[in-house]
Amino acid sequence: MYYVYILFSKKLQKRYIGSTGNLKQRTEEHNKGKTPFTSSGIPWQLIYYEVFQNKQDALEEERFLKSGRGRDRLNFLLKYTMENLGR
């Protein structure tokens, strides 16, 4: 299985979008500072994920979610989640 995931940092008030084959391990890596790009936002909270059987499908979805239309879709899907997180 492959995952596309979204983390949120209250500290930075930002989302991070990524993909992985091991969601639990990858989330732990982000929160232990092992990922330089996200180390300044610790702690990260997992707020959304999708599961794919094919790695290429997951990578394509990750790319889409990082695009303008993808961000619009996430704003729609996570409207109440983001409001509850204070953003």
Image (spheres, rainbow, N blue to C red):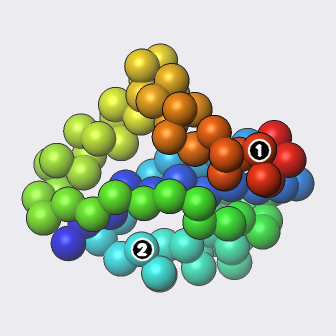
Query: Which residue corresponds to the image point at 42% horizontal and 60% vertical from the top-left?
Result: 49
Nearer the observer, 81 or 2: 81
Q: Give the residue type at disc 1.
A: Glu
Asked if 69 appears above or below 76 in the picture, the reply is: above
**Residue 40 falls left or right of residue 6:** right
Number of the label disc, if any, that sits on residue 54: none
Q: Quadrant of residue 70?
A: top left
- Label 1, secondary structure: give it: helix
- The three-letter amino acid code for the residue at tag 2 is Leu
Crowd around label 1: few <14 · some 14–19 · many ≥20 (10 Å): few
Q: Do tag 1 and tag 2 residues touch (Cβ < 8 Å)?
A: no
Quick one: SS at disc 2? helix
Residue occupying image coordinates x 68% and y 66%: 45
Please tell me in which quadrant of the rendered image residue 83 appears.
top right
Residue under label 1, please give it: 83
Decide which of 37, 1 is in the foreground and name it: 1
Q: Is residue 51 left or right of residue 29?
A: left
- CA–CA distance in space, label 1 to label 2: 24 Å
